[in-house]
Structure formats: C-alpha cells, structure tokens
C-alpha cells in the first residue's frame, strides 16, 4: 500500500477506503468514494502501488483531477498503522477489499475501528469464497469430475462455473482466497455492488436463512453509479461522434473487460460474426498488441495497421461505416449510456454487469474465467440477458465460429422483450440508489451507525 489520497469534506464521518489493484477491483471503490463524498463523508483513499496498466493509472489520475478535494501523498505498508491511528479527524470506519482486509484487520481491532468489506463481484459468487476452506477440507465436495458443486440450502453451481484453480488446493489463487476468508468474519458487514431485487433469492438465503455460519450481513448498496468525469480527461476517440449519429438501439457493443482474454482465432471469428449479424457494432478490442498503451495512445497508426491485419479487410472495410473497432480504451459508462446502444456482448466482469444494469442495456453473456460464469448465470436469472453456455473463448476445441456468433447476435439484437426487461431493470436500479430507495437507505443506516 503506498498511495494515499484524502478528501477533506466538512461534516460526516471520516472513512478510509482500501481498494485492491486492478481496474475491475478498483473501479467500485472510486465510485463508492464519490457517493460517500456526496453523503458528506470525509474520505481517505489508500491505494496499492504499482498500478497494473496505464489505463488504470490514467483512470486514477483523471479521477483525482476531477475531484480536487483529493490530494495525493505517498505511504508504505509499515506506515498503515500510524496513518490510521493518527488520522485527523479520527477515522470512524474502514471499507476494504477482502485481501487488504485480512492484512489490516488486526490493526483495526487494536484501534477499535469497524471494518466493512466492499465485495467486488456477485452475491452468487460469495458462498464459493466463504465456504472455500470447508470445501477444500473435503475433496469430494470440490471435485472437477462431478457435475455440480453443492452448497447447503443454495442451488448447486455447475462444475464448469467454478474457476479451475479452485480445484487445486495448492494453487496460489486458491490459497489466497482461502486465507482471505477469516477477514469476512471480522467485518461488521459486507457491502455488495448490487441491489436487493437483482439477486433477491441468494441475498435472502444468506441474510435471513443464515446458511453460512458467522457470515456478517450482506448489504446491497449498488449499483455503484459511474462518477462524473471532466470531459477533457476522458479518453478521446472517433467512436463518440460515430455513436452519436447512429439510430436508437441499433448498435451492439462488444467488450470483454480491461484485459485481453480472447485469442487471435476467436477474435477473427468474432469479427466475421459481427459483420454477418447485419447489425452495427462498436467493438472495444483488447489484444496483446494494444494492452501496454491502450489509453491516449501515441502510436495509433502503427497499431491500426496491426489490428487491420488481425481482423482482415472484410471487417476493416466496415470500420467507420457500419461499425467501429477501438483498440484504445473506450469510456464504457458513456458508451452504455448512449441511446444508440441496443445490446452488450460482455464477459460479465461484475463491473460490466452493474454498468449494464445501470444503463438498462441487455447483455449477451460470453464469460471467460474467474467469477464470470457465475455472474453470467446471475445475468440470465435476473432477466438482464441471455447466455450461450456452450461458448468458450476459443481455447482447445472450443472455437466458436463466426456464422454461429452472427446468428446469435442477430437474434439477441432483435429480442424486444429482452430489451424491455433490461430497461425495467435499469429503472429499478435507479430507484434503488435514489433517495428513499433500498440501496440509498442502506448506506444511510451504515453512516448513522458510525
Ligand atoms: N472498461 C472501460 N473501457 C474499456 C474496457 C473496460 O471503461 O475499454 C471498464 C469497464 O467499464 C469496467 C472495467 O473497465 O468498469 C472492467 O471491469 P470488469 O469487472 O467488467 O472486468 P475486468 O476487466 O475486471 O475483467
Ligand atoms: N477478488 C476480490 N478482491 C480482489 C481480487 C479478487 O474480492 O482484489 C475476488 C473477487 O470475487 C473476484 C474473484 O476474487 O471476482 C476472482 O478474482 P480474479 O482475479 O479472477 O478477478 P478479476 O480481477 O479477473 O476480476
């Protein structure tokens, strides 16, 4: 931990936020920071260094410039304790990522400071982490050759939805998650980036039926809405002008998160599928060649050539006509808010799901790894989208061909019932976070208790 930014507002409680690294993990904390600022809190934001990508570094510096209430100073790990104990005004609470929480929990106990965890994925994924030590202690319960993983009093999860490293107790990711678990038990509550109605049955099972012992209450406070970005600091790109001139609900937006999960052959088939679907498209394409300098790229021309070669002329020919392929960072909040977007082909990283619910845009789920298949199931069960379960991401013999992709995207974009359901979810999401809504009230209760 080394960067510390402080928002010195007047009035309310002083809260320190501890996000983890990575765009997907950090975004909800930046959003929560702005929401709490709006609720008269003082916020100290303590972020780990180094940032992983230039996009992430740029997002943070853009955030700090948009919110000049925050100043930035450097800290290192051994200074966390003195920093927390000497904060002025004194801290009222800490909201932390699960992994950082296990590190700072003993300090917080000494200082008598309440710990809240902000969990960065779906409620449905949480039992898998919360019950992981138990699952690992009995190999028959976490067995890759069975069809499901069973949880007491919860629907089973298909074995394909479990991140493969979890079947290996010695894997570093598995060990990290298993040792993070005790932090849950130390937390006063776990804040969830979702709203009550969206994942009602799992929330009820965990909060009211208490099916996991010692699990603190799960408090849905989302969806954590995108924060205002000053215009000159958001990524530039021709896509904005192009998007604004397209008809309502006519464009399918494709993005698989901040990293590059799909291989070259699958990228090429997806390109064919987009052209074959007959729909307009905006594709935020992440490739190995664009990952290092995806934001405000200086070498756009060379890169366009690479992307052109990768995609082939039939896709490239559509660029700027029926479609846009962006190999630089796009502003996804802003894209999803545009009325021309009629559907979102997404890997179901949880931020992307919450952004789709906020925008009321239907999702065609194409999950890859980690928590994404579980999230895709939530997308399907909530009515926000559809999921073609057979689709993999082109590894092994799992390549999905362009024709099939094109047909499915066509079907998805023509589904007006689905679009209507997603629009309703968008309305419910906004109601939940507006004054008097369930998420808004939950935040009020937490702040009052401090
Ligand atoms: N994102 C964006 N522009 C891009 C790619 C991603 O703004 O070109 C944002 C997206 O809106 C989301 C985050 O980056 O807030 C990605 O988080 P998510 O949980 O969806 O996926 P991850 O990248 O963690 O797999
Ligand atoms: N996770 C978390 N905090 C972190 C990293 C991971 O809570 O800092 C949890 C979270 O539930 C996440 C899951 O672990 O969805 C899988 O982690 P992974 O690294 O695959 O997530 P990604 O960064 O790809 O979204």
Image (cartoon, rainbow, N blue to C red):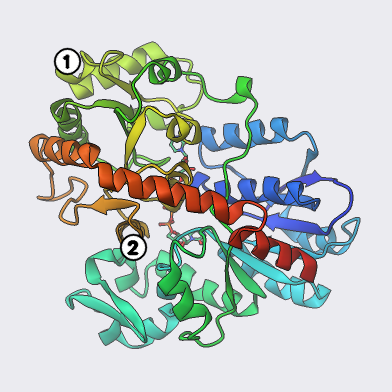
Instruction: Describe the element under mark 1 as helix, strand or loop.
Output: helix
Figure check: 309 above or below 429: above
Q: Position of residue 365 (x, y in %)?
A: 28, 49
Mark 2, ligand 2, within 8 Å: the answer is: no
Q: Which residue is pictured at 16% across the width and 15% down the height?
A: 313
- From the viewer's perspective, is residue 127 above or below residue 416? below
Q: Is residue 48 visible?
A: no
Q: In which quadrant of the rendered view does residue 168 lie? A: bottom left
**How far, Cα to Cα, is label 2 from label 1?**
36 Å
Q: Which residue does the numbered mark 1 point to in the structure image? A: 313
Residue visible at 81% across and 61% down in the picture: 84
Q: Residue 197 carries which label?
A: none
Local crowd at mark 1 within 10 Å, few (<14), some, or many (≥20)?
few
Please name the residue that numbered disc 2 is placed on. 374
* Residue 181 falls left or right of residue 61: left
Q: Which of 122 and 129 is in front in this view?
A: 122
Left or right, residue 311 beside residue 75:
left
**Image quarter hosting the C terminus:** bottom right
Residue 430 in sight? yes
Q: In which quarter of the image is residue 112?
A: bottom right
Q: Count neighbours of disc 2 (C-alpha within 10 A) and say few if under 14, some if 14 to 19, many if 20 or more.
A: many
């Amino acid at each position: 931990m080394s960067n510390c930014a402080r928002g010195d507002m007047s009035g309310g409680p002083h809260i320190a936020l501890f996000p983890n690294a990575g765009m997907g993990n950090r975004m909800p904390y930046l959003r929560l920071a702005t929401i709490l600022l709006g609720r008269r809190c003082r916020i100290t934001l303590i972020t780990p260094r180094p940032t992983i990508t230039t996009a992430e570094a740029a997002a943070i510096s853009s955030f700090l410039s948009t919110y000049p209430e925050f100043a930035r100073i450097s800290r290192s790990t051994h200074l966390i304790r003195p920093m927390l104990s000497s904060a002025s005004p004194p801290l009222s609470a800490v909201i932390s990522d699960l992994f950082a929480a296990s590190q700072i929990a003993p300090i917080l106990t000494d200082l008598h400071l309440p710990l809240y965890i902000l969990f960065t994925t779906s409620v449905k994924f949480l039992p898998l982490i919360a019950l992981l030590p138990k699952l690992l202690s009995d190999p028959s319960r976490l067995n890759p050759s069975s069809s499901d993983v069973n949880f007491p009093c919860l629907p089973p999860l298909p074995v394909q939805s479990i991140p493969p490293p979890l079947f290996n107790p010695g894997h570093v990711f598995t060990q990290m998650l298993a040792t993070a678990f005790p932090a849950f038990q130390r937390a006063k509550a776990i804040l969830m980036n979702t709203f009550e109605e969206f994942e009602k049955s799992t929330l009820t099972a965990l909060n009211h039926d208490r099916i996991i012992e010692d699990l603190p209450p799960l408090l849905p406070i989302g969806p954590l809405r995108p924060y205002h970005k000053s215009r000159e600091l958001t990524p530039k790109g021709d896509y904005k002008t192009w998007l604004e001139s397209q008809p309502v609900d006519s464009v399918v937006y494709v993005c698989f998160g901040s990293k590059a999960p799909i291989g070259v052959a699958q990228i090429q088939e997806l390109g064919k599928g987009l052209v074959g679907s007959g729909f307009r498209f905006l594709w935020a394409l992440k490739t190995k060649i664009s990952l290092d300098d995806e934001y405000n790229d200086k070498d756009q021309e060379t890169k366009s050539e690479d992307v052109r070669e990768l995609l082939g002329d039939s896709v490239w020919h559509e660029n700027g006509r029926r479609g846009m392929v962006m190999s630089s960072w796009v502003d996804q909040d802003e894209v999803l808010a545009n009325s021309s977007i009629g559907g979102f082909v997404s890997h179901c990283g949880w931020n992307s799901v919450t952004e789709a619910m906020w925008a009321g845009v239907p999702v065609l789920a194409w999950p890859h790894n980690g928590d994404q298949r579980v999230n895709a199931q939530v997308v399907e069960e909530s009515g926000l989208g559809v999921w073609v379960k057979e689709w993999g991401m082109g590894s092994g013999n799992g390549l999905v061909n362009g024709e099939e992709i094109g047909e499915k995207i066509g079907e998805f974009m023509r589904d007006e019932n689905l679009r209507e359901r997603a629009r309703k979810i968008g309305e419910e999401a906004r109601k939940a976070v507006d004054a008097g809504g369930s998420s808004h009230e939950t935040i009020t209760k937490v702040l009052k208790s401090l």
